[in-house]
Amino acid sequence: AQSVTQPDIHITVSEGASLELRCNYSYGATPYLFWYVQSPGQGLQLLLKYFSGDTLVQGIKGFEAEFKRSQSSFNLRKPSVHWSDAAEYFCAVAPYSGGGADGLTFGKGTHLIIQP
Amino acid sequence: NAGVTQTPKFRVLKTGQSMTLLCAQDMNHEYMYWYRQDPGMGLRLIHYSVGEGTTAKGEVPDGYNVSRLKKQNFLLGLESAAPSQTSVYFCASSYTTQPLHFGNGTRLTVT
């Protein structure tokens, strides 16, 4: 079975600084990979996804992520964070085969705090 | 276009009571899911459905039942609520594979 590890439970970044959130997955084949963001009291919103092809994917709100097969990683980055980026971020994986019908496996999340 | 709508938004139950959470989607999605979210645990899949009339167990199905009588609706039932079921419940749907579209959640407290 696949699994997702987000090593950082909390991260604090100053506004305007760069950001990198780490995600490592465990899966025997090429997975589908996702990053979601959750603002307080809200559902999850898709930031970006990787299915195949270019290993650097661009998402909404200025986020990008890079798939590195050799490291089993899919880290999320943003060059300059804004106070509105404060939220919970979830990395998720789905099997490449089977159409992903049995849902996503989520990491436990990283809580991002933005300092003024 | 409302997307995924969950009702109710909040609910407080006493131990042993029953309730049903309703999820409705207007995107004609085949796949629907129920997750629960607990602090430090991320989201865990309770049950899911790959089409009308079908359901399957996820990672944490015990104590829950589901039904998908209509394509647009996915119901999550608690027959006898327990304090361990205090959580935030999210419904999601998707067309064929990913990505998932999430509702805004139902916060359930069992006392």
Image (cartoon, coloured by chain):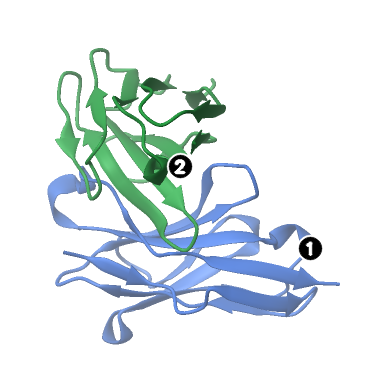
**Count of picture labels:** 2
- Residues at marks 2 and 1 on the same chain: no
- Subunit bearing disc 1: A
**Tag 2–tag 1 contact (CB < 8 Å):** no
- The colour with which the image depicts chain A is blue
Q: Quadrant of residue A25?
A: bottom left
Query: Dot 1, how many residues are within 10 Å of its Cα: few (below 14), some (14-19), or many (20+)?
Result: some
Residue furthest to the right in view is: A116
Q: Quadrant of residue B52?
A: top left
Residue in the image at 34% along x and 17% along y: B72
Residue B63 percent coordinates (x, y): 25, 36
Which amino acid, by three-letter code, is at mark 2? Thr
- Seen in the picture, residue A60 relative to A103 is either above or below; the reply is below
Residue in the image at 19% along x and 32% along y: B50
- Subunit bearing disc 2: B
* Residue B13 visible in the displayed image: yes
- Left or right of B103 in this view: A70: left
- Label disc, if present, on residue A7 of the rendered structure: none
Q: Quickly name the residue at label 2.
A: B86
> Which of the two marks, 2 or 1, is nearer to us in this view?
2
**What distance separates the C-alpha of mark 2 from that of mark 1?**
31 Å
* Residue B100 visible in the displayed image: no
Residue B4 percent coordinates (x, y): 47, 27
Residue in the image at 47% along x and 61% along y: A90
Label 1, secondary structure: give it. helix
Residue A69 percent coordinates (x, y): 28, 80
Q: Kindly indicate which chain is depicted in green in the rendered structure.
A: B
- Seen in the picture, residue A84 relative to B35 is either above or below; the reply is below
- Label disc, if present, on residue A83 of the rendered structure: 1
Please tell me which residue lies in front, B64 or A96. B64
